[in-house]
Amino acid sequence: MTQPNPFFIVGSPRSGTTLLRFILSSHSRLYVPDETGFIPFLRKQP
């Protein structure tokens, strides 16, 4: 068996990432963590 290749999906707030996360998490062979809120954090930095 080959090792799976991880991938990351990123997006701006209000761009549909939450909907995409819910759709992908319904698949039994995918792990989808909670959203991090990292991009809004970056926007607040000087």
Image (spheres, rainbow, N blue to C red):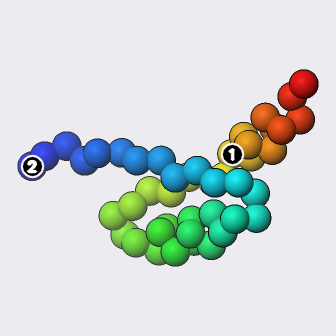
Q: Nearer the viewer, residue 42 or 4?
A: 42
Q: What is the secondary structure assignment of the residue under circle 2?
A: loop
Residue marked by disc 1: 36
Indicate the quadrant where residue 43 lies: top right
Total labels: the figure holds: 2
Q: Which residue in the rendered view is the most extreme toward the top?
A: 46
Measured Cα–Cα span from mark 1 to mark 2:
31 Å
Q: Residue at x 64, y 54 (%)?
A: 11
Residue 45 location in percent, x, y?
Answer: 86, 28
Q: Residue at x 29, y 45 (%)?
A: 5
Q: Nearer the viewer, residue 26 or 43?
A: 43
Q: Is residue 6 left or right of residue 19?
A: left
Disc 1 to disc 2: CB gap under 8 Å: no
Residue 30 location in percent, x, y?
Answer: 39, 61
Look at label 2 and name its amino acid: Met
Q: Residue at x 40, y 72 (%)?
A: 27
Look at label 1 and name its amino acid: Thr
Residue marked by disc 2: 1
Q: Is residue 1 left or right of residue 24?
A: left
Residue 17 location in percent, x, y?
Answer: 63, 63
Q: Earlier in the sequence, mark 1 or mark 2?
A: 2
Indicate the quadrant where residue 12 lies: bottom right
Which mark identifies residue 23?
A: none
Q: Is residue 5 above or below residue 18?
A: above
Q: Residues within 10 Å of mark 2 (few under 14, many from 20)?
A: few
Q: Is residue 6 above or below residue 18?
A: above
Which image quarter is the C terminus in? top right
